[in-house]
Amino acid sequence: MDTICRHCDELIVGEAYRVTSEDEGIIMLDMIVCHLCFMEAKKLGLHAEAIASESDSPSVRNLSNHNPRLGV
């Protein structure tokens, strides 16, 4: 099954991550992202964790094609 990153719209190769945020018990953000967007979320202090492991190797992506939208 192909999974698309809900942040950068790239195909997730390798591990997928769930990024969540809540305010007073209300879920404000819940999305599946790639490794690079996971790292951006961690820099912003959002809760992020691995949700699936398709292989033991890290995600391989062409960094020149990654278009982050968080401005970090």
Image (cartoon, helix red, strand yellow):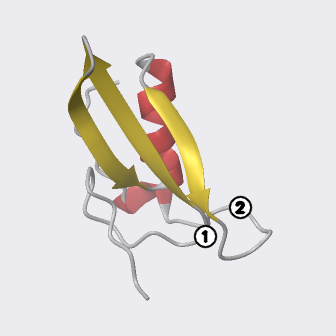
Q: Nearer the viewer, residue 28 or 66?
A: 28
**Is the residue 45 above or below the residue 68 in the image?**
above
Q: Which mark is residue 35?
A: none
In the image, what residue occupies the spot 23% across and 30% down?
Answer: 27
Q: Amino acid at mark 2?
A: Pro
Identify the residue position indicated by label 2 in the image.
Answer: 58
Looking at the image, tell me whether mark 1 or mark 2 is earlier in sequence order.
1
Considering the image in quadrants, where does the N terminus appear?
bottom left
Q: Residue furthest bottom?
A: 1
In the image, what residue occupies the spot 40% across and 84% down?
Answer: 2
Q: Which mark is residue 14?
A: 1
Image quadrant in which you'd find residue 59: bottom right
Q: Is residue 68 visible?
A: no
* Direction from residue 22 to residue 63 in the image, left or right: right
* Direction from residue 57 to residue 42 in the image, left or right: left
Tell me whether the residue at label 1 lies in contact with that at label 2, contact meaning CB atoms closer than 8 angstroms: yes
**Is the residue 29 above or below the residue 14 in the image?**
above
Crowding at dot 1, Cα within 10 Å, few <14 / some 14-19 / many 20+, comes out as: some
Q: Is residue 25 visible?
A: yes
Crowding at dot 2, Cα within 10 Å, few <14 / some 14-19 / many 20+, comes out as: few
Q: Residue furthest top?
A: 24
Q: How many marks?
A: 2
Percent of width and height locating residue 5: 33, 61
Percent of width and height locating residue 55: 73, 75
Percent of width and height locating residue 45: 45, 16
Image quadrant in which you'd find residue 26: top left
Circle 1: element type: loop
Circle 2: element type: loop
